[in-house]
Image (cartoon, rainbow, N blue to C red):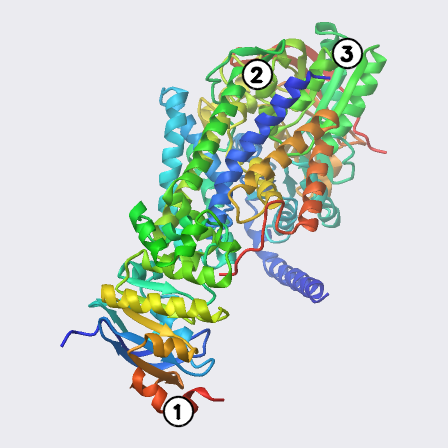
Amino acid sequence: MTSITRRKFLGSAAAVAGGIAASSSLSLPALASGGTIKVGAVLPFSGGLELYGNQARLGLDLAVSEINGGGGILGEKIEVLYEDNKTDPKTSVERATSLIRRDEVLALTGPITSNARDAMAPTIKRMKTPLLYATNYEGGACSREVFCFNTVPNQELEKLVPALKKEAGDSFYMFGADYVWPQKMFETAKSLVESEGGTVAGVEFTPWGVKEFAPVIRRIKESGAKVLLFALPGADGITFIKQAEDLGLLEDVTVGFLGFAETYLGAFGEGKAQNMWVAVPFAESLQTPGAQKFVQKIRAQAGSDVPVSHYVMTHYNALMAVKDALEKAGAVDKDALMDSMQGLTISTPTGPAEIGAVDHHVTMNMYLAKTEGAGLSVVEDLGSIVPEAGCS
Amino acid sequence: MDKPVLELDGISAGYGTGLVLQDLSLTVDRGEVLGIMGRNGVGKSTLLKTLMGLLKVRSGRLTFSGHDLTNAPSYRVAAAGVGYVPQGREVFPDFTIRQNLIMGNLKARNDDIDAAMDLFPVLRERARATGGSLSGGQQQQLAIARALIGRPALLVLDEPSEGIQPSIVREIGTTLKQVSAEKGMTIMLVEQNMDMITQCCDRVVFLEGGRIATSVPAAQLLESPALLNKYMAF
Amino acid sequence: MSSVATIVLDASNYALILLLIALGLAIIFGLMNVINLAHGEFLMLGAYTVLSIQMAGGPFWLGLIAAPLAVGLFGLVIEEVVIRRVYHRVLDTILATWGLSLLLKQSIVLVFGPGSHSIEDPISASVMIFGAPYPAYRLFIMAISLLVVTATFLFFFKTRIGLAARGVIANRNMAACLGINTRNLDRMTFSLGAALAGLAGAVIAPLISLDPHLGLGYLVPAFLAILVGGLGSIMAPVVGAAGVGVTENLAATFLSPVYAQLIVFITAVLVIRLAPGGLLGKKRRQT
């Protein structure tokens, strides 16, 4: 009991201190910021998902330099304040709170994981600060403050499932990590498979951190499935694919890799993990002028060997949307930004994208691609796909 | 005159913050068999544990055969030539008798082990038994043999007669006397058992208040019950 | 359902990997009372040693030999610099080794980046066993694990230094009073435990994604294995790793990985509840 009381006390003490700091510095930024619009980025730069944090940063950095190079927004410069959330929800909330209170950011972007985003949601709501979320996720994050710039399940699956059915066969096995994103993914996938006249041979989940997948791999093999819809992100996913290759599963099934990004390339070893199919809003090998120019600009800034995945583009898009929205509104404040972003169409490296007026999710172009050689090659331009955001 | 083999100079030591030994000084001559007596809790075992490096010396100096062993780790004390037979014997219960003996000297050869078993024939009879399966008296004999196999210059024993039947106590006493005489080994014997003390010892010191209260030739002990009354009675 | 032979091979393969990892942990804990939370990172160092050699163009087999040597040497240094100063205070060893694990992970991120790397399969062939193909490399892992575990047991049960080490496990103070150089033994123990982890890391490297966090996924079941087997016994990890590894693998085979983890945890809790010292455990001496 005492610890709770103490925590409460510390919490309120911190709030008071924060309030004082905020009010005492109120006049300063108001005067000095004649120059800057601040956006806070709560991203993982340690703790496991730093790869994604780094990708997001590439896109944000490019957007900043393009916006400022073009004269800023309504005469003001834009600045992104990066905070490491250590891949941890609690830290995310702390960082978000301090960015809003102390740094008085206009908007936040990030995080990567859904549990960090959900943890930040009440803070975002209470402080009426827009959140520009640019990671693919399960859907359902709907509020006045939240805007989602990456995909929800139907955008990835709608065209991928029929393509895989045509390519490999009718029978689908689904295997993923035991949390909400794969579960929602598979829910959507299941109805798609069934409406396409295919069958679901099995749906299975695994806890994080498992290193030995032989039992699951054998079960999938014996199910006779032709397609494996796979939603196990990160190192565990790589471990699974390596073992699936060794145990001969990849000869029997074609993998639909959900949540794939170029960051995975190279992690499987040369000539491994071929012919895995994905649907993505961007691929670095995409041969359109817009996409190629984007890749070039990123590499000019960050080095020629960085992977440029859709995470780079969606975070770039998120910040560019801020510029368009504020310029449309003609004012720099949170409400103007939120109002103005609703229904806004922005131009992106892959063509125009429309921010939903009600659901705040983005309708954008999608691409069917597969792993081939050392890269990801685009098979088909799927056109723009409207998100089913799952807002009730 | 030879230099004493062991010199304790103003030693203070104890457990936690309390001091059991306070400014204790004692010298032991080479080849001497010294009895150490005193009431319970007066610091006899503490003295041996301090000597063995199991307890920290807070002040004072401990010299053995010319080596300063003040606060040396136990294995260095043992390597310098001190053999230890602790209270409760502490044989390795899961090890065989042979393995227990080897623990006393990792470089022991078969004849060393034979020689150790010669001292206490019962060890040979039960050579394959584990330490834990032996009787108390047999364990005590094993503990002594284990200490002797390292060929110590000084053997220290903590109440070897405790809980052991008299016939075996006498056998142990005889063996100690014999080893001391044959090899010129120095022995320190903490003991309550008067028979054992008088059987083995040349000299006896009495501990009281954390230091040596008095020192007498063992022969005098029987003639002066007053001493025993003064330092042993409750 | 897979053939019985395949199921048995898969389960043994996993149990033997766990055993190799748990053995190092158990030796270090048994002799030194140190709960080495950096053991998973020693594993990681072993795997990254193989990666470094692969990047330099060297063969996998060289990495397999270099990993235990490098990590063993590293363990020796860590023992001297860190562990020996804290080993008699259990809580401090937990904090120190935990800190070490963070430090190692971060260093690997700095040197190799946060992303995943891959080790080429050193043997890509399959062997037919009872009519079903089985990857030869998995058989090789089983052979290596059996060999190394057997050698470790021979060392502990057939040599005098091994005897001395077991004496230290049973009664550190008495062993020291008999002249066993506990200081050298501690050095040797920690280094040997680290080397075993390094070897395990090298051996499993081709099976998994190489990233700075790879240790944890193995450390948890390895800890369970020594808890279930019993603390303070060198035989315990054999029983524990077999128990944990086979249970997890069979549960994953017949049910699902989610249930497998659940069942392993529940079984472990039950075993520890019913036999607090573990299956082979006995009351440890207070030192």
In this rendering, do the residues under marks 1 and 2 share a single chain? no
In this figure, which residue is indicated by the disc labeled 1?
B225
Q: Mark 3–mark 2 contact, CB under 8 Å?
A: no
Q: Nearer the viewer, residue C194 or C130?
A: C130
- Chain of the residue under label 3: A
Q: Which chain carries label 2?
A: A
Q: Does residue C36 appear left or right of residue C70 in this picture?
A: right
Chain hosting mark 1: B
Q: Is mark 2 on a helix, strand or loop?
A: helix
Q: How crowded is mark 2: few (under 14 residues within 10 Å), some or many (20 or more)?
A: many
Checking the image for residue A246, the label placed there is: 2
Camera-nearest residue between B58 and A219: B58
Residue type for callout 1 = Pro
Q: How far apart, in angstroms, are the residues tagged by discs 3 and 1?
A: 101 Å
Place residue C76 in its image quadrant. top left
Mark 3 vs mark 2: give the one in front.
2
Q: What is the x, y in percent for residue C133?
A: 60, 11
Question: Is A148 or C133 nearer to us in this picture?
Answer: C133
| Mark earlier in primary sequence (3, 2) | 3
Three-letter residue code for mark 2: Asp
Give the distance between the C-alpha atoms of the residues marked 1 and 2, in whole angstroms: 88 Å
